[in-house]
Image (cartoon, coloured by chain):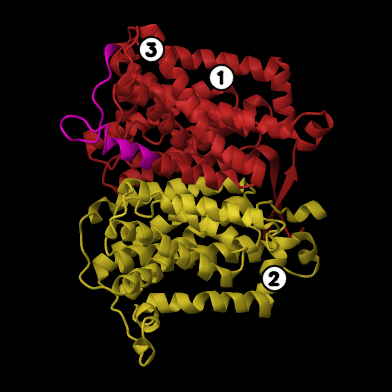
Chain colours: A yellow, B red
Amino acid sequence: MNDLITILFTAIASGTIILYATIGEIITERSGILNLGVEGMMLMGAFFGYFVAYHTGNLFFAIAAAGAMGGLMGLIHAFITITMRANQVVSGLALTMFGQGVSAFFGIGLVGKTLKNSFEPIAIPLLHKIPVLGEVLFNHNILVYIAFILPLVVWFIFVKTKWGLAIRAAGEEPLSSEIMGIHVVKVRYIATIVGGILIGISGAYLSVAYSKLWVEGMTAGKGWITIALVIFANWNPLIAYTGAYLFGALEQLGLTLQKFNIAFPIILLKSIPYLFTILFLLFISLKGKRSNLPKALGISYFRESRE
Amino acid sequence: MYKVKLEQRERVSNKQELFITLYAIGVALALSGIFIALNGVNPFVAFWKVLLSSFGSTYGISETLLKAVPLMFTGLSVAIALNSKIWNIGAEGQLYFGAIVATAFVLHGPVLPTPIMLTILLVLGAVGGAFWASIPAFLKIKFKMNEVISTLLLNYVAMNIADYFLFGSWKGPDNFPYTVEFPIQARLPKIGFGRLHLGIVIALLLVVVIYVIINYTKTGYKLRLTGSSLKAAKYAGIDIKKMMFAVFLFSGALAGLAGVIQVTGIEYKLHQHISSGYGYTGIIVAWLARSNPFVIVIFALFLSVLLKGADSLQIAMHLPAAVGTVTQALILFAILGSELFKNYKIKFLWGNK
């Protein structure tokens, strides 16, 4: 029983990494911009967050700095794909390489350095006393709680507000939304930058709050898994919960099987998250329609081409 | 007040295009100079060191050519897929899988005379790479799964499989994660210029063969048609699914060959670092070369200088080796940015027009 609680608790903690990034990528993709640079942006967030946390000792400052770094990378992607009208796939790949390179380049001095302070778990009064559920859900640090609320907020913005409508319109029908008075270029810039901020935060959560250390390339493909989870979530922030925490649980599967002495090569267990991500995608494809796929996703939009 | 207006223009001439590309590379190198300077190293000295290490001696030249060989294979691999609008981001994994299959034969199969042995290894490596590429191919064709994600995720899996053997039954006698050295029969012969081996001859032959296939055969015509317009290809009665599958397999086979060439050409064993990201750098080579096989050779050489340069800067000036990755990313950004200048004329309009 205790094992199970630990596994589920860690699943929530590790699913949070992906949840921030998935919500960020959903915002960006909903506006019509495909950002394949998540892996690199997460690494930049992880590095820069850790860097700031190490030198200032202020954890919230570190998270904010990582968000700013992610937003800056989002801005680069937006500039290259929207203003310079370049291929979104290649720009994303360049962004990934850039993040991997720069974080390794400047992060070399942080390897093996430990932080003096860390995000402490906050037990939510009353709720954390609920058997099992309370222990699994309500004894986490502040960033995990924010991630509980974030998808709801973004879902609300999408469905109920003018901004949400503008983002979805830009991703579905950029031409007609421009006629309706939506500034498509501006909307896509903002969505890409905001998405970048959340992806940057996910990286800092990973290094500063979750693993509490910096290792070169520490995201190990989580950025790519994020992109797959966005499809799994059908671009819906509420389904993103399921995908992210399920993935968090899968990551724990390896450790669990080890504990129960199941005869399976440990090294191959490391492949489980990648293989399951592919299975997720397969499942989605078999289920049929991807109803929320933004129609204009990945397609450059030229304002003057309608003139 | 001025306004920027973009005017679509005819395709630029080859000469202009070359000029714009070179200019973009120049900008990227200047930016990477800033990164180098941030680390307290004079970028001019660093660049000079890079040039010197690549071209300053016959040894340097042979090493530059040596490093360009796997890049030619992975560049061709990505390019052949890109020609049919398929993104093969999985050349890295296909490279490893090809190397694993070939290594399995060396370790567990009979030792045969060199020509037979090498032929078998090359074929096995190509088959291994093709097999690894057939997974995303199947998923894309049958289930419309985006190949960018599937090929990339499979890279991690391929490297885990390599780890599984390297930390398991293939572990060397001194308990480090690499295999025993390959017998002499399983080593590509040197061609008498430094460590340069037969792999470069195979690569160049493939460049010519692929060029001929693409431009002068019926298959090549079908390929080009499929790449330029799916609709047109359908009307012409081309079986697009079969075509796509074949392209995936061929692309994977080329990447798999890169893996065999690495283990039989220079490493003489399998270990965790037989590729320094050649699968990913291959994407840049293919993109820069616009999928033209001959131009791939040139850009494979260029990126080889860059990778080798980063290595030598690490040794000589204690710069993190990641400076190579950063520079590659900057080149991609700059080339992407330069596309605008190829497709549009930029006019600055003064006043409020």
What residue is pinned by disc 3?
B117
* Residue type pointed to by label 2: Ala
Q: Which mark is residue B333?
A: none
Query: Quarter of the image holding residue B175?
Result: top left
Q: Are marks 3 and 1 on the same chain?
A: yes
Image height of B309 relative to B116, above or below: below
- The residue shown at (41%, 18%) is B121
Q: Position of residue B165 (x, y in %)?
A: 31, 36
Classified by dominant secondary structure, the portion drawn in magenta counts as loop
The numbered mark, 3 or 1, whose residue comes first in the sequence reads 3
Residue nearer the viewer, A288 or A198: A288
Q: Which mark is residue B294?
A: 1
Residue sitting at the far bottom? A126
* Residue type pointed to by label 3: Met
Instruction: Say which element carries label 1.
Output: helix
Q: Position of residue A129 (x, y in %)?
A: 34, 89
Relative side of A192 to B273, left or right: right
